[in-house]
Image: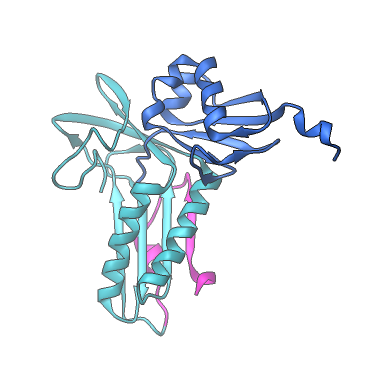
Chain colours: A blue, B cyan
Amino acid sequence: MSGSDAQNPISVTVLFFAAAKDAARASELLIKAPYPATVRSIKAQVFDQLPEISRMSRSLMVAVNETYAVDETQVMDGDVVAFLPPVSGG
Amino acid sequence: MLDDDRIEITTKPLDAGELSGLMNDADCGATVTLDGYVRKWTAGRETLHLVYEAYEPMAIREMRILAAAARERFAISRIAVVHRLGKLDIGETSVIIAVSAPHRGPAFDACQWLITELKRTVPIWKKEVYADGSDWVDPQRSRDPGDGQASSP
């Protein structure tokens, strides 16, 4: 791919579960984010767009493509970023 | 052997006896099974029913990771980790963990370890429905000296 493609915004699917889904009033959100993106930048963008989700920020875990991630994890075009409240299975 | 493991998420009712039986093989001398089901009372509140949801593909992935880790840590043979989703009434089984092994010690230890880790890492959530409202269970808030979590094993 040419250098100019690397500057285009990326498309990311954001998923919400449980209490986060209730707060967001949606289970899925398609967003465009500036490149380069990380979990940190995606969180900031989602929190900005959905204040109800930002209120849960301290207890939310994030997964990228079904794997637990940290703030520094890179997010690429087409990735699925899931916002996970504290789990309570079993 | 991995092929004989049962790692599943389902909406169908669970049968701990049946799943436990599937874990037998000639090398084993014991199967330890946890049958986790819905409890009626939590901190003085009566549960009407629970609703479980999951990030299913990730939950399966995490359950498989746990099974592989258990196999590394404990001298065990077959592993079953099965979780049910949807609406569950009092007494209905939400989770079964069954582990077979040549000797009972590792089977007990692995079963205990698997349920502890499942409750810590697998992306499944339960909502408690009471007569006067409902809450997504927050494991940090609902500490119970018996088991550390509301309405669950």
Residue B109 lies left or right of residue A29; in this view the side is left
Residue A15 lies left or right of residue A11; in this view the side is left
Q: Any magenta on residue B11?
A: yes
**Quadrant of residue B91 within the rendered picture:** top left
Height in image: B114 above or below B120?
Answer: below
Q: Any magenta on residue B111?
A: no
Residue B22 in percent (x, y) is at: 43, 69
**Which residue is most to the bottom?**
B26
Front residue of this view, candidates A32 and B66:
A32
Residue B7 in percent (x, y) is at: 48, 58
Front residue of this view, candidates B3 and A73:
A73
- Residue at horizontal 41%, vertical 32%? A60
- Residue at horizontal 49%, vertical 20%? A47
Front residue of this view, candidates B91 and B97:
B97
User: Which part of the image, by quadrant, shows the N terminus of chain A?
Assistant: top right
**Which residue is most to the right?**
A2
Look at the image and tell me whether residue B94 can be seen.
no
Per the rendered image, the range of residues in magenta is B1-25
**Which residue is most to the front?**
A3
Look at the image and tell me whether residue A65 can be seen.
yes
- Residue at horizontal 15%, vertical 32%? B43
Residue B35 lies left or right of residue A85; in this view the side is left
Tally the numbered discs: 0
Residue B102 in percent (x, y) is at: 34, 81
Residue B60 in percent (x, y) is at: 51, 52
**Quadrant of residue B149 within the rendered picture:** top left
- Residue at horizontal 43%, vertical 54%? B82
Height in image: B108 above or below A85?
Answer: below
Front residue of this view, candidates A76 and B76:
A76
